[in-house]
Image (cartoon, rainbow, N blue to C red):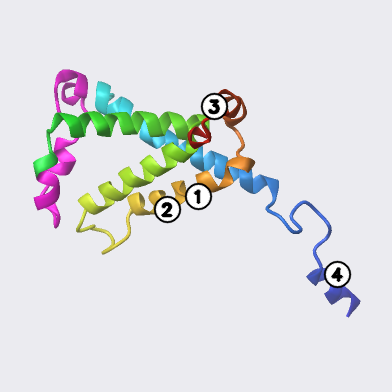
Amino acid sequence: MAADAAVRTAPPTETTGRVHSAAWYILAVVRILIGFEFLWAFLDKTFGLHFYTPPGQAWINGVSPTYGYLSAERALDWLYQPLAEMWIVEVLFMAGLLGVGIGLMAGVAVRISAIAGAAMLLLMWTAAFPIEANPFVNYNLINAVIVLVFPFILAHQKLSLAEPWQRLTAKAHWLH
């Protein structure tokens, strides 16, 4: 009986009653990785780095970074196809990729970055219907839900420039 009690009772560590500190670092790595995904998409679409975008198809060569994705024939093509190759859509998309990428990677302006990132991911999720591998879920939906966690954990943010950024933007809390 005493052995059972020892197994069931957690020792008084930093995991008792609160989240283990390793979890904050894991969430920081997830934030940085998702931020890098956004930043990399910006760099590849802008300069054609041979990964997804061939050099001749780069934005700096005058090729639309949104046309291929938005012009595809899918369930919501009536909504997205007219947006393909609109310069304002291209500029907003690319600015979003850059801003969300830098914000999440550096841990600055996380609220705005997370909301903008979730909105972009949800739009890309709806533009992908029908989803080939699963009738409802793809990585865009999963990442949209994940990035919405980051504004709620600002006080525990690790591996970031949040502290100097918050001092710099102390009077504008919406920028934290």
Residue 94 on image: x %, y %: 28, 30
The alpha-carbon separation of the residues under discs 3 and 2 comes to 26 Å
Question: Is residue 169 at all visible to an observer of this figure?
Answer: yes
**Which residue lies at the image location 9% right of the left edge and 42% below the top edge?**
82
The N terminus is located in which quarter? bottom right
Distance from disc 1 to disc 4, alpha carbons, whole Å, reads 35 Å
Q: CA distance from mark 1 to mark 2?
A: 7 Å
**Residue drawn at point x = 12 percent, y = 33 percent:** 85
Helix, strand or loop under label 3: loop
Q: Which mark is residue 145?
A: 2
What residue is disc 1 on? 149
Q: Mark 1 or 3 closer to N-term?
A: 1
Where residue 29 appears, x then y in whole percent?
54, 39
User: Marks 2 and 4, Cα distance to the nearest angstrom?
Assistant: 38 Å
Q: Nearer the viewer, mark 3 or mark 2?
A: 3
Classify residue 114 by image quadrant.
Answer: top left
Name the residue type under label 1. Answer: Val
Which of these two is toward me, 172 or 14?
172
Query: How many other residues sit within 10 Å of disc 4, few (<14), some (14-19) or many (≥20)?
Result: few
Mark 4 residue type = Ala
Task: Kindly identify which residue carries mark 4.
Answer: 6
Secondary structure found at label 1: loop
Circle 1 residues within 10 Å: few <14, some 14–19, many ≥20: some
Q: Which mark is residue 169?
A: 3
Q: Is residue 38 left or right of residue 59?
A: right
Residue 53 part of the magenta-drawn span: yes
Residue type marked 3 = Thr
Q: Please give the range of residues in magenta.
A: 52-81
When asked about the image quadrant of residue 43, the answer is top left
Give whichever of 31, 91 is nearer the camera. 91
